[in-house]
Amino acid sequence: MRSGQLRFYALCYPEDVKITRHTRQRQAVLDVLRQTRTHPDAAWIFQEVRTVVPNVSLGTVYRALDALAREGVITTIERAGERARYDYKHTDHHHVVCRSCGAIFDVDCAAPPPLTSAQLPAGFRLTEVVLEFHGVCASCHEDAQN
Amino acid sequence: MRSGQLRFYALCYPEDVKITRHTRQRQAVLDVLRQTRTHPDAAWIFQEVRTVVPNVSLGTVYRALDALAREGVITTIERAGERARYDYKHTDHHHVVCRSCGAIFDVDCAAPPPLTSAQLPAGFRLTEVVLEFHGVCASCHEDAQN
DNA sequence: TTATGTGCAAAACGTTTGCTTCCTA
DNA sequence: TAGGAAGCAAACGTTTTGCACATAA
């Protein structure tokens, strides 16, 4: 890491991650995600990336997000009828999701998966544990009372 | 409960659940879900419900599923680019999801949420903890080796 | 009686994909 | 220079919605 900013994002990938090609577009998508904690959706990321790569296309953003998610660098947060939201794994944390307004809060807790490998189906190769806390945030149930 | 089959699904709802109206369609959707452990999608449920209510519409099925999910009677399992899948909460359990073929396995474990209320955002009202184990099932990584 | 649910079909929506061109390695 | 990635736009398929009618309470 030379200048406080990673030159190649591959450098922060786990060993077994295969990046076949490094492009400005993918770098920009990753940079945008690393510079926010707001769990943005694809449209917002697209808009941000455009300030760096003006004629990037939304399809490219989706392909980059898909690649990054497969590589385990980012997390995808999905809810019924809502746009998917993306999150760079800054730290080991989980999400608190308001089902009313969609707000997402981080919870820093390196909770070990409460599951032994013996409980998994035979031969299942675990890659990620999704732990989300759903409910209604304070401002939403205040609103509901008005 | 008269005949081993609930007459009104409202009977098995938590106290605070408000069902405004009981209809054959909603009953049928719930019955279908209670009679399977396969985590079906809306299309499959629709098809099943049609054997009971022949001219039910897909829109109605979606509306029923939405209502049941809001009421906390069923769980929705969502993955990017895949159809949502629905699950009646037979017992307290969590899901193991194969990211390759989409297979969903149940894991019976009443794991308490590894989070104290103090860790939640102030005033957040927790309604559900989503705990999913993602990875690749045995037959999928066998396939990958062929 | 009346508000809520349904059926139908069209629309909406986020996301994916095909194809050609570009460009990284 | 070869194959992965981008750009564009069209397609996709699930889910949602508007409206008129039906129905549970």
Image (tube, coloured by chain):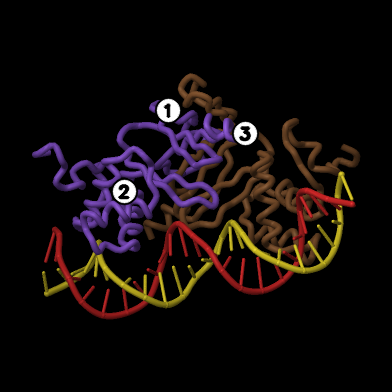
Chain colours: A purple, B brown, C red, D yellow
Q: Quadrant of the C terminus of chain A?
A: top right
Q: The numbered mark 1 sits on a residue in which chain? A: A
Q: Earlier in the sequence, mark 3 or mark 1?
A: 1
Q: Confirm whether circles 2 and 3 share one chain.
A: yes
For the residue labelled by badge 2, is the local secondary structure a helix, a strand or a loop? loop
Residue B31 screen position, x and y as percent: 76, 49
Chain on which label 2 sits:
A
Does residue B138 appear in this view?
A: no
Residue at image coords 52%, 21% = B117
Q: Quadrant of the N terminus of chain A?
A: top left
| Proximity of marks 3 and 1: CB atoms separated by less than 8 Å | no
- What residue does disc 3 label? A146
Q: Element under label 1?
A: loop
Amino acid identity at mark 3: Asn
Residue at left offset 47%, top offset 48%: B137
Residue under pointer 2: A71
Tag 1 near tag 2, CB within 8 Å: no
Give the spatial CA distance, label 1 vs label 2: 21 Å
